[in-house]
Image: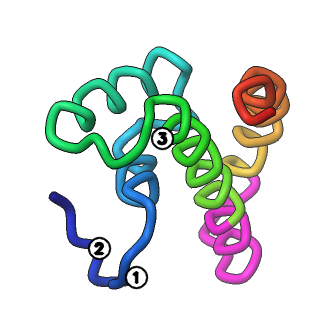
Amino acid sequence: MLFDWERFGRGSPAIDLAPLIPNLGTLADYKHVIKNYREVSHSLTDEQLLKQIILAKAWIVIEVINLFIDRPKSDPQVHLNWYNNHLPNWLDEMEKYLL
């Protein structure tokens, strides 16, 4: 069980699972996390959890980009360039699992 004291409340476990996946992650990364999580909880199906983890990961991307824009680090462009290079392909790959 994970406790996120920043957003304390009831919600999807995907909100806590998505940050455990490095970078944007791949389908294999998500399935690995889902497999491990489902050993202790069966509240959601694999398909439901996959969709929710993808959406939670997208939410994280939006929050991170907003932080880069609102509170620029020494060189936020490096991070924004990384997203520009990786996000379109990730979105194309994940889209089919959300439909």
Secondary structure of residue under mark 2: loop
The mark that comes first in sequence, 2 or 3, is 2
> Residue 34 appears at what percent x and percent y?
36, 31
User: What is the CA distance from the residue labelled 2 to the residue labelled 3?
Assistant: 18 Å
Residue occupying the far top of the picture: 28
- The answer to whether marks 1 and 2 mark residues whose Cβ atoms lie closer than 8 Å is yes
The amino acid marked with disc number 1 is Arg
Locate the N terminus by quadrant.
bottom left
> Residue 70 has which mark?
none
Q: Which mark is residue 4?
A: 2
Q: Residue at x 44, y 35 (%)?
A: 45
Q: Does the magenta run of residues contain 68?
A: yes
Residue neighbourhood size for the residue with mark 3, other residues' Cα within 10 Å, grouped as few (<14), some (14–19), many (≥20): many
Could you say which disc has been placed on residue 7 in the image? 1
**Dot 1: within a 10 Å radius of its alpha carbon, few (fewer than 14), some, or many (20 or more) residues?**
few
Residue 17 or 21: which is nearer the viewer?
17
The mark closer to the camera, 2 or 3, is 3
Is residue 66 located in the magenta-colored stretch of the structure? Answer: yes
Residue 5: horizontal and vertical position, in percent?
Answer: 27, 82
Q: Which label's residue is closer to the chain start, 1 or 3?
A: 1
Identify the element where label 3 is drawn: helix
45 lies left or right of 6: right
Q: Magenta stretch: dominant SS?
A: helix
Residue span colored magenta: 63-77
Q: Nearer the viewer, mark 1 or mark 3?
A: 3
Please provide percent x and percent y for residue 80. 75, 51
Q: CA distance from mark 1 to mark 2?
A: 6 Å
Q: Identify which residue is drawn at 65% across, 81% down.
A: 71
Instruction: Locate residue 20: give its quadrant.
Output: top left
